[in-house]
Amino acid sequence: MLVQMQVRHFAIVKDLHIEFTRGMTAITGETGAGKSIALDALSLCLGARADASSVRPGADKAEISAVFELASNPAAQAWLSQHELDIDDNQECILRRTLTKEGRSKAYINGSPAPLTLMKSLGGLLINIHGQHEHQQLSNSEHQRQLLDQYASHAHLTESVAEKWREWRRIKRRKQELTQQADELQARQQLISYQAKELQEFNLQPGEFETIEEDHQRQANASSLKDEAAFGINCLYDGEHNNAYSLIQAVIERLSQQVSVDSRLQPTIDMLAEASVQVEEAVRELRHYHADMDIDAEALKYLESRMTEALQLAKKHQIPAEQIPELQASLESELASIESCTEEVAQLDQQLNESWQAYQKAATLLSNSRAKAARALSKAISSSMQQLNMTAARFEASMASDDSHASVDGSDQVQFVVSTNPGQPLQSLQKVASGGELSRISLAIQVITANRANTPTLMFDEVDVGVSGPTAATVGRLLRELGERTQVICVTHLPQVAAKAHQQMRVEKIHSKDSTHTKMTMVHGDDRVIELARLLGGDEISDKALANAQDLLAS
């Protein structure tokens, strides 16, 4: 429950400290005194949009903090633990919001900076706020469905439906993407199938073109290569006169005769001996090369044909011939991808059907739960409306379920219909109810649905507008009964409602020479009687008004 609030430099509030207790608390005050300040400030702590104009004139920033006691709120405790924002030993949670005059806003949960999305998420587990204009939303079918779901308390069913709807949508989007791709690739598939087949038939292996090119060059020049090898053999060894080997041997022989005269010739002789061995090795290699170098016209013809076709394919695809194997692999991979895409579309058809059936099953369970809750809600609100001086009123939460309405929220359309006079058929709220009736209907709906709310604190901001007399007393009684089960904070202008509260706060606007600020204090005993008398009779408090106020409190 909400334990306390601290508001500084917000709107006309200078510094306000408010402590709240269990039960029903009524907040009263003159028009314009700032009764809704607590609601507006609290809304900021719950993640509402901030406006720099809310900073008190002359102040640099506004600061609002709210302390909630969570001993009996396991859902909020679990949420904080999940987000590593554990509560302290007192099992309290502190929400704080600051707003500068330049419009910069910061939010904190238990002292840790937090985005507004997190603050809103946590706020939904701490407090439920019902505004004075909420009846204006009643004509919205989405809002009506939310109220019915709140009353039904079947969050596990709505979550299941939403999960299965999102999964069905995911599969459907994937199928649409693949189907579009398949359509776009169909024409390309024919082209690349032909290209891939052509390349597969040619079947050029990686590195093969380089080998063909080298072999072709060798075969094309085989005759001259053979002649040059023979020339080399002759020059190095076989020539009758002055071949290299013989000349080296002659030099070695003559120098060796002079070594005894000058030993410095020995290194030269050793090098020449080594050169002689190298010449012999080179000659052996050339003999093998000459012997292996056959002139093969058929081989040359094959190589020329293979190389010509490779160059033609390369030109056709505008790539170097060496990259033909890579292109073939790429086309084959693309073909496999297209075929896989077609197969996946077929698989997704089955998955889509199974997913839709799972969604329909979950939506049916949700529809059945809503129908059961709708009957109970219709009965409860009809009874509550009759207590609010609409004795002939009938209310019904009607439902229409159809796959054409399927969405993340299920396949139901919910509509609140009402009859306020005997013999009048049930019709939509905006067609039947007057302004005053709509306010009472809205109040009845809010009180009944609030009974099922999981949040431990409920705040009502002048939801009793348009209500007076005995009906106002009934409103007060309904809110007090609600306050017996949960914390209720009610901003009201009706003495009949305020008198039913377990405790009452008075809001005053204090004027000084240079400024104006709001003050909020708890009223007890005679002060409370005087405040109720003021609500009854205005600023001029008569003995009769005081007596009426005492009677209200006594009742």
Image: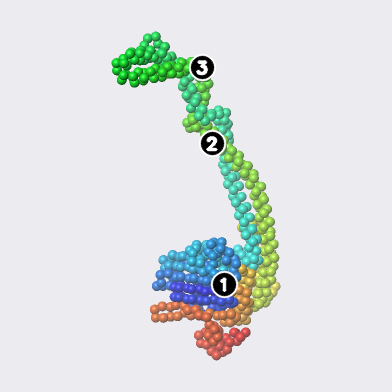
10 Å neighbourhood of mark 2: few (<14), some, or many (≥20)?
A: some
Residue at (58% x, 37% y) in the render: 335
Percent position of residue 426, x then y: 67, 69
Q: Are marks 1 and 3 in contact (CB under 8 Å)?
A: no
In front of the other: 408 or 482: 482
Tell me the CA gap for discs 1 and 3.
101 Å
Instruction: Single out the mark in the foreground, 1 or 2.
Output: 1
Identify residue type, mark 3.
Asp
Identify residue type, mark 1.
Met
Residue at (44% x, 70% y) in the render: 62
Q: Which residue is mark 3?
A: 296
The disc at residue 212 is none
- Where disc 3 sits, the SS reads loop
Q: Which residue is mark 2?
A: 330
Instruction: Single out the mark in the foreground, 2 or 3.
Output: 3
10 Å neighbourhood of mark 1: few (<14), some, or many (≥20)?
A: many
For marks 2 and 3, the one nearer the N-term is 3
- Check the image and name the residue furthest to the left: 261
Residue at (59% x, 69% y) in the render: 73
